[in-house]
Amino acid sequence: MSAAPAVAARDAVARAEAEPLIRAEGVSVAYGKAQPVLSGIDFEIRPGEIVTVVGPNGSGKSTFLRAVLGMVGASAGRVWRAPKLRVGYVPQRLHLDPNLPLTVARFLRLLQPLPDAEVLSLLARVGVPGLEGRSMGTLSGGQFQRVLLAQALAGRPQILVLDEPTQGLDQSGIAAFYRLIEAVRREIGCAVLSVSHDLHVVMSASDRVICLNGHICCQGTPHVVSNAPEYRALFGLGTQGALALYQHNHDHNHEHGPGDDHLSDHGQSPTHSHEGGHDR
Amino acid sequence: MIVDDFILRAALAGLMVALAAGPLGCFVVWRRMAYFGDATAHAAILGVALALAFSVSVFLGTLITALVMAAVVSTLAGRGWAMDTTLGVLAHSALALGLVAVSFLPGVRVDLTVYLFGDILTVSRNDLVVIGLGAAMVLGLMVWRWRFLLAATISEDLAQSAGVNPARERMVLVLALAITVAVALKVVGALLIAAMLIIPAAAARAYARSPELMAALAVTLGAAAVLAGLGLSLQFDTPAGPSIVAAASAFFVGSVGGAGIWRLVRRG
Ligand SMILES: Nc1ncnc2c1ncn2[C@@H]1O[C@H](COP(=O)(O)OP(=O)(O)O)[C@@H](O)[C@H]1O
Ligand SMILES: [Mg+2]
């Protein structure tokens, strides 16, 4: 435990020195001739960083991800991505036509060839071993999301981009899913850019939270954002209770040391950092 | 047994169409483009009229109108028009307009049933070369783009995240569809081309565990339908194109029924 702050500090220095993986400057996005959905977005993410985007429905979160990945063009500003950036992407929606026969193993091989052993180990890694022969159409919601995550990991990404990856999961499923993402991230060291409404769950794990509503309302550490008036105005006051509730569950699941303060924000101080609590 | 030349040519033409229609038909099914296929095929009649009016080859005429139709549909879809209505309007308008236009052509009276239902028994050596080249192009496109087409079909978002351009893959499919319509016109006719795309693929679905297997099975079933339909046509003097499609339909019914029985048996 005692080494954790030093490691975290060293990591932070290394990140600040690294070139960003993605940088956006003054980006606006409009669909057709309509009013821009996003405007004036400045953003960057560095190797290993965890950034979470929150915002109400229709606030442009998915569009933000699509814009920084270059899947939708910017009507103003510019987006820069590291050359040959390997992206693992979990889209918000993935509808499979029942007439398309597709096993889980074949789905993991959709974007790149993958040896059998790798398919098995990826599925085991995301907690759904043995599904390789199953048809994608027969998976439960939780299994499906984990297989999507495995697919995103298959290309050995430098950055994971997750668009509401916990939709359709129940409360404990959501917490477990985020723990999985954090564990995977620690192993492979990729950056994580995710979108969520599950504010209370995500916030604790993030280096930085971006609160979005057509533009960036506020951003910063989870603690700063959850106390920002812009954030409170957007999400109301109820979220503070949810935040505390989740952290209680979370600490409980992970058996933090007796000195832990249940009401503290994980991202706020290095001594209570998430990574410190999990490492062993 | 001595097989007449014209029967051999007919069988070859049909088999080549089945070879192209199998994998393409799978994408038509997976992407729910059945109506799109119909609209493109119906536009071929307008292409026939234009080809005859300007004395260019019917193949070229149908290829170009099919491409124009596909472009119009894609543009309207991009502007948010309701697709089933738009396609219904365009498909039947093109068909009707083509039929009216043909009747205005001076000189030779054109036998429209040839274009509506195909005339596989009169396929010439030249036709065979054109059909072969067209089918080879479609099959080549399918094999070359398979990975990308499949990724874009399963999720445009995922495909895009890996650098695949879904719009380009859509264009590939549209091009393949237009070529298929142009070569299949002589074989099954404008009214039944979509059937040759959809029915073998649908019949293959129940037995396929992977997309590739489904395409291969669709080719096999399509080829079997061509041979069975031709045999039927020679035996009972029925029109060849509709006989082929009828045989494919019988396979479909058999496939669905067989799959149902298989499930029952397995359950005990
Ligand atoms: N492909 C599209 N064409 C037109 N409008 C779109 C498209 N995608 C999203 N929008 C609009 O952009 C706005 C933001 O959408 P989105 O980025 O999906 O928001 P969020 O993910 O935060 O719910 C919404 O008003 C939505 O209707
Ligand atoms: Mg969204």
Image: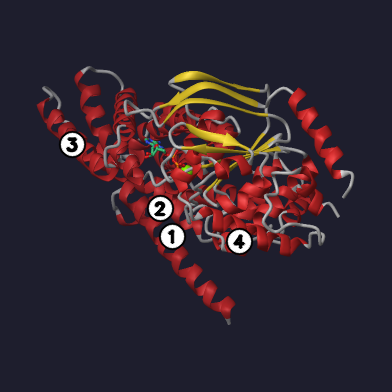
Asked if the residue at label 3 sits under 8 Å from ligand 1, the reply is: no
> The C terminus of chain A is located in which quarter?
bottom right
On screen, residue A168 above or below A95: below
Q: Helix, strand or loop at disc 4? A: helix
Q: CA distance from mark 3 to mark 2?
A: 25 Å
Residue neighbourhood size for the residue with mark 4, other residues' Cα within 10 Å, grouped as few (<14), some (14–19), many (≥20) = some
Q: Nearer the viewer, residue A231 or A185?
A: A231
> Which one is closest to the eye, mark 3 or mark 2?
3
Q: Tag on residue A245? A: 4
Query: Quick one: label 3 or label 1, which is nearer the N terminus?
Result: 3
Q: Identify the residue at horizontal 44%, vertical 37% (top origin).
A: A213
Q: CA distance from mark 4 to mark 3?
A: 62 Å
* Residue located beneath label 1 in the image: B251
Q: Disc 4 residue type?
A: Leu
Q: Tag on residue B199? A: 2
Query: Quick one: label 3 or label 2, which is nearer the N terminus?
Result: 3
Residue neighbourhood size for the residue with mark 2, other residues' Cα within 10 Å, grouped as few (<14), some (14–19), many (≥20) = many
Q: CA distance from mark 2 to mark 4?
A: 56 Å
Q: Is residue A10 left or right of residue B213?
A: right
Residue A122: give x, y in percent of width and height.
74, 51
Residue A88: give x, y in percent of width and height.
65, 39
Query: Quick one: label 1 or label 2, which is nearer the N terminus?
Result: 2
| Residue at mark 3: chain | B
Q: CA distance from mark 1 to mark 2?
A: 9 Å
> Which one is closest to the eye, mark 1 or mark 4?
4
> Which one is closest to the eye, mark 2 or mark 4?
4
* Residue located beneath label 3 in the image: B93
Q: Nearer the viewer, residue B145 or A79?
A: A79
